[in-house]
Image (cartoon, helix red, strand yellow):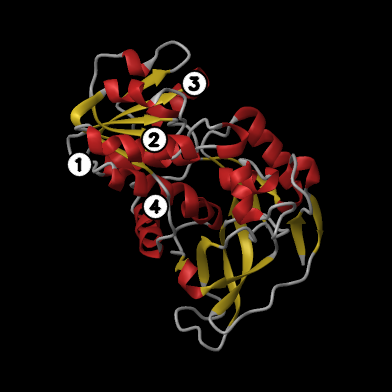
Amino acid sequence: MKAIVYEKYGSADVLRYADADKPAVGDDEVLVRVRAASINHGDLFAMRGSPRLGRLAFGIGRPRKNVLGRAVAGTVDAAGRDVTRFKVGDEVFGEVNQRGFAEYVAAKQTLLAAKPAEVTFEQAATLPVAAETALQALRLGAVAPGGKVLVNGASGGVGTFAVQLAKTLGAQVTGVCSTRNVDLVRSIGADHVIDYTREDVTRGKVLFDAVIDLVGNHRLSAFRRVLTPKGVYVSSSGSGGPVLGPIPRLVAATLVSPFVSQRLRGLFATLDVEGLAHLAALVVAGRITPVIERTYPLCETPDAIRSLEAEHARGKIVLTV
């Protein structure tokens, strides 16, 4: 099969579209013929081996796995003898742990959800990781009807889902983004949009019940200023440099939280197949719509990643196979 492979850490220049062995299928696994895969920031971390603390998982000196990609959608091509949830021909989507930028991938049946016919493969591929992270952030933030929610980084892959999902929960949403993305964020349902090049949201007078921080570009104390006394701050990012990445911000939130009235939370998103099914149902119902800026064929993955790193995608970038 063809796949996007790499043998050392670095920029998109280390990636190659090359032949690779088709994966063997375990007893509780299915072989998925990949139809679409989305690019997530975790893929960039794995490619670059940065932050370096992540190399404990990716491989110390070189990548432990030589195929990128986590979020995929496709068709079951073969099934192990213990598989009961799917059969050959079923359309599925889910997470596959850095093996998805390929024509085929083997995955445990517990990592996949059934793809509704009304959801395209490209749309389904955006839901694992990005939409899951947004959903879990809002749940951690205890977002409720009538609550005021701030989404910092509202135009990105996770942010576009966070804005829409918060609206489905009945919240009043303020999105923060750059000038070129103001119209986009407004079009997906944000009640208010703040252009961070013109206004610092942390110096405003509006208080929020929940802050979903997907960027980490302000101090923790600055975001606390715009939280209600019982508000919840949720962070999935930070600026700990090339070694620690988001870890200092996530740890700081956890350590400070017991000593203040506000709840400060670090988000470590996990795979939730029931959550994936819920997200797909929302797409079918038209309550959320994946924002896909552009699709690229699998062979152009290096160019897709260069584009993502240079311009910061509006929504998701999807690879088609």
Which is nearer the N-term, disc 1 or disc 4?
1
Residue at the farthest top position: 198
Q: Residue at x 70, y 64 (%)?
A: 103
Q: Nearer the viewer, residue 110 or 126?
A: 110
Residue of label 2: 252
Residue 14 percent coordinates (x, y) = 79, 45
Q: Crowdedness of circle 2 by 10 Å Cα count: few (<14), some, many (20+)?
A: some
Where residue 283 is drawn, which disc sits there?
4
Identify the mark nearer the N-term, 2 or 3: 3
**Mark closest to the chain's N terminus, 1 or 2:** 1
Q: Is residue 233 visible?
A: no
Q: Position of residue 141 (x, y in %)?
A: 28, 41
Measure the C-alpha gap from mark 1 to mark 2.
26 Å
Residue drawn at point x = 62 percent, y = 28 percent = 311
> In this picture, is 301 found above or below 188?
below
Q: Residues within 10 Å of mark 4 (few under 14, many from 20)?
A: many
Mark 1 or mark 4: which is in front? 1
SS state under label 2: helix
Q: Which mark is residue 144?
A: 1
Q: Which residue is mark 3?
A: 178
Residue 250 locus on image (x, y percent): 42, 39
